[in-house]
Amino acid sequence: MNFTAIYKRCEDRLGRRFSKYGVLVSRYPWQVLVVCVIINGLFGIGLLRLEFETDTIMAFTPQNSQSMQDRTVIRDIFKENTSGSNFFPKGQIRTAQYPSIIFKPKVRSNILTQTHMDEIEKIHNFIMYNISITDNTTNLNLANLCALRSGRCVVQGDVVFSKTFRKAMELNAIPFPLFNNDYLSWIFGDVEFTGRYLHSAKMINMVFFLRQDTAKMSALSFAWERKYMEALDTYSSDIFDITYMTSQSIDDELKRTILEDIPLFIITIGMMLIYAGFATSGGNCVSNRHNLSRAGVIATFLAVCASMGLVSAIGVKFVVINGMLPFLIIGIGLGDMFILLSCLAECSTKRSIEDRIKETMRTGGVSITITSVTQFLAFAIGATAPIIGIRSFCLNAGAAVIFCYLNQLAFFVPCMVINERRVSRYGHCVTCCPTKPREELRAEGKSDCNTRCCSGHPPKDRKDNESPFETYFKIPFQYITRTPRGKVAIIILFIIYVALTVHGIVHFRRGMRLSYILTENSTEYTYINLLENHFIAEYDIEFTVTSRLKYSDISTQNSINEMLTNARADPDINSKITYSWLTDYKTSMFYNDVSETRFIAGLKAFLTSRIDHANDVIFSSDGTSIVGSRFYVITNDLRESERQGKLMLRMRDIATSSPLPVICFSSWPFLIFDEYAYSFQVTFQTVGMAIAAIFVVTLIFMPHPLLLACVTATMVLISAGILGFMYYWELTLNAITMINIIMSIGFSVEFSAHICHAYITVDGHTREERVHQAINRSGGPIINAALSSILGIASLAFTSSYLFKSFMKLMFLVMIFGLAHALLFIPVLLSLVGPLPDEISMQTSTDKQISIHAIDLKEDIEDIGSRSKTGDAVDDP
C-alpha cells in the first residue's frame, strides 16, 4: 500500500476546501475582516460577567476527592457551630475566619523574655480592644466578636500571658509540647528544646478565633477583619516585625495577582508587535511584510479577549493560573501566522492574488488545522480533570485555540489579501502610497534618501519575501541534518536527553504549597513562608464514627482502642498524645458500663465537666444513643508533601481496615494532601487520554504510519522530558505544573506536525532533498514561533510569583524541546527511513495535481467570464 499517495489524496481533499475559502476571502477581504472583528467584539462583551475563583481549596484540590466526600459526611453529623459557646480549634470542618499574626524580633533572638512578652501583650490588647466596628451605633471590638469558651475569648497563643507560663519561663522549665493542655508546637517557631522542656524560640504565631455561629456574626466578623488589616498596615513596633493574615488575605492577594498580570500582558503584546515586525521585515519598501505580521498579533489578542468573554459568559470562573493563558496563546497564534506567511512566500509571484491565496490556503490551511485540532483536543481532555483550576484553564485555553485558529482564517488571511493588493499596485509598506522601483526613481533624479526609503517592487521569489530571521536561522539545521557527523551528534544528543529524562522522572517530587500561588513581595507570602519553614507542621487527624454504635460494648471499645493504637504506631504519628473521650471517660468517676442507658447518662455527666470532649460526641434527638463521635491523634513534624500524602493514605487504610464504620479526616490538611494523592494519577490519566486522542486525529489528517509514529513519539518524548527536567529545576508535580505538561502535548504536536506535513508535501527525489526542502519551508516559521513564544514569556522573569516562574521555566523547556525534536531529531529520522515516493506514485501525484489545477483553471475562466459580464474588476494573471 502506498501511504504517501493516500496521504496526498487526503491532503488534497481537505486542501480543496481551503482553496475555495481562499477564493471567497480574495474577493471579499474587507467584508470578512469586518464580520470577524464584530464577532470577536460580541464575544468579548462576556468579560463583563468575569468572576474570580479565589478559594484555594476549591481551585486547587480535586472536587471528587475522598476528602471532599468525607467532609460532607462529617458535616452532616457535626452540624452545630460551637464558636459562640464552646469553641475548640480541633475538629473544625467549616470555613473559619481566623485573623492571625506572627511576631518576629527585629534582632533575631530568643523570644522567651519578659521584654518580648510584655510587647506582645501590648499588641494583643491593642488588637483586642482598640480595633472596632460599628453596628447600629454600637461599637464592637474583638472581645465582642471572638469565639467563646466558658464565656472567654479563645486566642491561640494567649497562654504566654498567664502567670503560670511566665513563672515557668523565668525558671527555664516550660513543658513542651504540652503546657497545661495547650499545644505549644503550633504557637512557637524555630524552637529549641531538650528533653521535655522548651528553652528557646524565635517567633510566636497568635490566632484570633472569631464567631460565625450565625449569619450576622459571620458578617460582623468579616467586617472586623477589614479593620484589623487596616490597623496593622499602619502599626509599628520597636521590637517586632509583625506579619499578619486574615481569612480574606489570600483571596485579596489572588485578585491583586490577576490584576497585576494585565501590565505584563500589555508589555508582551508590545514586544510581540515589535518582534513580529522585525522577524518579517525582509525585502524592500513594497514587499516588506512587517505590518502584515502585526495583524497576526492583533488577531491573537482578539482571540484571547473573545475566548475569555465566551467562557466567562457561560459561568466559568477565572482562576489565578488563567493569567498564564495570554502568554501561551500568543505563541500558538504567531506560530500559525508564520506558517501562513511561509506558504504565501512559496507561491509563484507570477500568479494572480487569488491563485496565491488559494495555494496558501491549500497548504497552510491544512497545516494549521492539524495543529489547532490537536491543541484543542489536548486542552479539551485537560478540561475533564477533577481540579477546578486545571479545568478552568483548559476550558479557557481550548476556547482560545479555536478563536485563534478562526481569527487566522477570518482576520489574518483577509489582511494577507489586502497586503497583496497593496504590493500589486506598488504601494509603500508604511504609507500605502504608490511608489516605483529604485531604478525608475534614480532615472527621475530623486535623491539617494528618497530612492532608499521610497522605492520598491513586488517580490520576485521567496527570498524577496523573507527576513534574515527566516532565511538564515534555518540554514544550520539544514546543514547539520545532512552531514553524517551531524546525524551522529544529534543521535548522541538525544540519547543523553533520554537518559537525563529517565533520571529526572525517577527522582521527581510531588507536592503543592500554599505559597506557590502567592507573589513573593506580598505580606501573605511572607506569613505563609514563615509558617511553612519556621513552625512545626503538626496536624490533628480525626477518626470519625459515622453511625450508631453501642459504646458500652467491650468489643466496640476494643476496636476503637485497636484503631488508635495502630494509628499511634505509625512513625509519623506522635505516639504519646491521643485525644479520646472514651479513654478519659473510662478513667473518670462518671463511667458506668452496666447498660447502654447508664453508659449514656454517665457520659453526659462526664462531658459537663470535660468540655474539651463535648464537641466530639453527638447524641440522637431523644438522647438515648450516640449517632457519631470522633477521636484524634497528632502527627509529628511533617513538612514534605510526600510524607504528608503517604501518611494520609496510611491513616485511611487504618480506618478502612477497622470493623467499625469509621472515616479518617483532618479538616483542611487532607484537602491539600489529596492534591498530592491525585496529582500523579490525574496527570498521567489526562496525558494518556490526550496522546491517544491526538494519535487518532493525526491518523486522520496524516494517514502515514511513519509520520504518525514520529508525531506520537515526539509527544511522548517531550512530555516525558518536561516531567523529568522538572527535577533539575526543583519543580514539583502539582496542579500548577500539571497544566504545563498538558500544554506541552499541544506544542509538541504543532512543531512536529509542521515538519512532517512539509516533508510529505514538498518536492524531492531523495530523502535528503525532501528534508532540506521541508526545513526550508517550515524551519523559519517553527524557529520564529519558538522565539516569539520565548520572548512572550520573557516578561515573566521579572515576576515574584512561583506560579508564573514555573510556567516560564516549563514553557521555555517546551519550546527548546519542541524545536530540537522538529528540526533535529525528526529530520534525521526522516532522512534515514522517511517515506520516498516511487516513480508510479510520483506520476499518480503529478496527474492528480494536473487534474486539480485543470479544475481550478476551469473555475477561474468561468469566474472571469461572469465578472467581466457584471463589470467587476479582474486581477491581472
Image: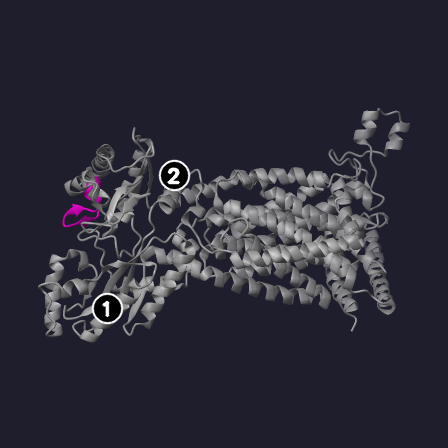
Q: Residue at x 63, y 58 (%)?
A: 498
Answer few, some or many: residues within 10 Å of disc 1's Cα (few below 14, many 20 plus, some between 14 and 19): some
Q: Quadrant of residue 755?
A: bottom right
Figure disc tally: 2
Q: Which residues are magenta?
A: 141-154
Horizontal and vertical percent position of residue 501: 59, 56
Is residue 745 among the parts visible in the rendering? no
* Amino acid type for the residue under numbered disc 1: Asn
Against 214, residue 166 (above or below) is: above
Query: Left or right: where does residue 14 sit relative to residue 175?
Result: right
SS under mark 1: helix
Can residue 479 be seen here? The reply is: yes
Of 82 and 446, which appears nearest the observer? Answer: 82
Judging by the rendered image, the residue that carries numbered circle 2 is: 523
Identify the secondary structure beneath mark 2.
helix
Question: 10 Å neighbourhood of mark 2: few (<14), some, or many (≥20)?
Answer: some
First-in-chain label (1 vs 2): 2
- Determine whether, in the image, residue 643 is placed left or right of residue 719: left
Q: Name the residue nearer the viewer: 726 or 272.
A: 726
Disc 1 to disc 2, C-alpha distance: 44 Å
In the image, is 163 to the left or to the right of 867?
Answer: left
Residue at the limit of the structure toward the right, as seen here: 443
Residue where numbered disc 1 is placed: 561
Residue positioned 35% across, 66% down in the render:
652
- x, y (%) of residue 419? 75, 43
User: What's the residue type where badge 2 is placed?
Assistant: Thr
Task: Residue 219: give x, y in percent of width and height.
Answer: 27, 46
For residue 196: magenta?
A: no
Q: Is residue 142 magenta?
A: yes
Is mark 1 in CB contact (under 8 Å) with mark 2?
no
